[in-house]
Amino acid sequence: MTATMAMKESVLNLYNFLIVPWIAGIGLSVMTSGIGCILVWRRLSFFGDALAHSTLLGVALSLVLNVSLFWGVLAICIMVGLVLSYFPKQTQLGSDTALAILSYGSLAIGMVLMGKISAKPTDPASYLFGDILTVTFGDLAVIFVAASLVAVFLYYKWQPLLLITLNPDLAQAEGINLTLLERQLTVIVAITVAACLKFIGALLVPALLVIPPATAASFARSPKSMVVLTFFIALISISLGLFLSVQFNTASGAMIVVTALSLFLISRLKVYRS
């Protein structure tokens, strides 16, 4: 009887330990599903990667100015995103070159600055790989406010986004302001990356934006169904990743991505067999 009670108590403690991170995972799945699909459709996966790498510069800025991590990271992500949309058009550099320069340049500058901040010693690894198990109720508020902003944007801009993805010339002929819409999308991607940083990590956020949509693409029959499938794939990846990270005492962000990758490989195997 004592052993049974101890087992029940252990399960209850595990439940209480994982429930808040799992709720956070719902918000993260809402954010990354729609935005991830847009990035994959528009072949902008490396754009999310560049913004994610720039977050370390935002972390350093937050520590220097003693402001909230989210706002510091968001400011840098928006700035880098807008520069990325402007830079290739005004220079002879290709967009991939501009992405590489800003991505790795901001990552390196951020790590150097973090190493020089002696008043608040920080471990860059915690920001590179994240830890969703450290989520607080305050973090939940940030996540769900950000998820709401992303959802509202996609709801009102869904048709224009699809149109500029399929046929930019037709979208322009229909009176859609492509420059404005792309800048709005940049801000929304920046919000998504900034909200995910602490829990997934700068190096792994792009994986959560790309792998679930890539998995869903094999089964979706329409753009909307792909977003819905992506949401559930992301949520399953986060749920299983959380549980496995606790069971095997590994980094939660890395285990979430490993789970997402496993689902992707399984999906490709099924597609290959069919």
Image: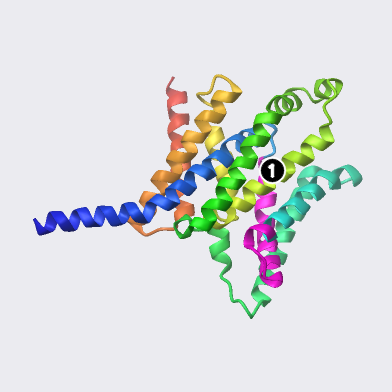
- Residue 94 vs residue 203, the one in the foreground: 203
Residue 139 lies, in percent from the top left, at 54, 56
- Residue 130 vs residue 6, the one in the foreground: 6
Q: Amino acid at mark 1?
A: Ile
Is 199 rendered above or below residue 121?
above
* Residue at x 81% of width, y 50% of height: 83
Residue 102 lies, in percent from the top left, at 76, 55
Tell me if I can see residue 176 in this picture: yes
What secondary structure is found at the residue carrying circle 1? helix
* Residue at x 29% of width, y 57% of height: 13
- The magenta segment is 45-71
* Residue at x 66% of width, y 61% of height: 56
Using the rendered view, name the quadrant where residue 86 is placed.
top right
Task: Please check the rendered image and state whether residue 34 is part of the magenta-colored stretch, yes or no.
Answer: no
Query: What residue is shown with label 1?
Result: 188
Magenta region, main secondary structure: helix
Using the rendered view, name the quadrant where residue 273 is placed.
top left
